[in-house]
Image: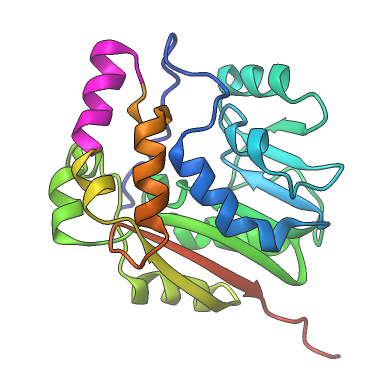
Amino acid sequence: MTEKPSHPLKFLSGFEDSRPDAYHHVDVAYAEEWIRGEKILNIGCWTGSFEAISSGLPQKAFALDQDINALGIARAAHPSVSFVNGNLFELPFQDNSFDTVLLFTVFEHLGGREQEALQEINRVLISGGKLVLSTPHSHWLHGIMDIAHWMVDHRHFHEKEIEGHLNSTEFKLIRLDLKGKWVSTLCIPLFYLGKYFCRTNIYKSSWYKRLLLNESSRPGFRDIYLVAEKSEAPLI
């Protein structure tokens, strides 16, 4: 079967900055337990919004993205973080380099190359290292409201599908949560309207942050959040 092309995020001049949106706050809350004091790599860091609000970052953190324009904003905002221009499928790091890898809202853009990406992440993690990941969950309402899902194959996943990918690449799922309900799902078209017609991001507004954080504190259906562990190296 022919793989579908991936659709990486496009840098939109006049819209992008390093200020975190509501989802970065959800990401940080979910990840902080797994990054405090660890050597971490944040893949798909974009403009460095996650790094802007995470108090749990180690003194020396690494972050990677393939868009040089987004990295320019990130580097200017956070000079203490090592921002690297690179490709998820050919990570410019040695084997067993990191305790934790973060992969927020990237998995859905890989166009059928999910296992290839997970294998490369597995390579740079230490034995027993953690992968913290978020990606859209397959739900009928989310499928309708997510404009990118039906325009550019912004993929949505079932839990069993994700677990299958993890098992096939020597990861063990240790936690999975579903987050986001009506607010986060129904506001997706408003986000795209604001982005492309007004160059404004409703996800960065204080009212949306309050609503999303409240909604994300309870089980939902829109997004998958998970933690997986790299299998221990076999004894020889």
**Residue at screen point 81% across, 58% down:** 38
Say left or right for 113 vs 70.
left
- The image shows a total of numbered marks equal to 0
Q: Is residue 143 visible?
A: yes
Judge whether residue 173 is colored magenta. Answer: no
Q: Is residue 112 visible?
A: no
**Residue at screen point 42% across, 60% down:** 217
Q: Nearer the viewer, residue 211 or 23?
A: 211
Say left or right for 3 vs 23.
left
Expressed as whole percent of the image width and height from the top left, the position of residue 212 reads 37, 46
Q: Residue 15, located in which quarter of the rendered image?
A: top left
Say left or right for 129 vs 109.
right
Judge whether residue 194 is colored magenta. Answer: yes
**Residue at screen point 54% across, 77% down:** 173
Expressed as whole percent of the image width and height from the top left, the position of residue 179 reads 37, 60
Q: Which residues are magenta?
A: 188-200
Looking at the rendering, in which quadrant would you find the N terminus?
bottom left
- Where is 154 relative to 236, above or below? above
Q: How is the image coloured?
A: rainbow
Expressed as whole percent of the image width and height from the top left, the position of residue 202 reads 33, 27
**Residue at screen point 24% across, 38% down:** 188
Q: Main SS type for the magenta part?
A: helix
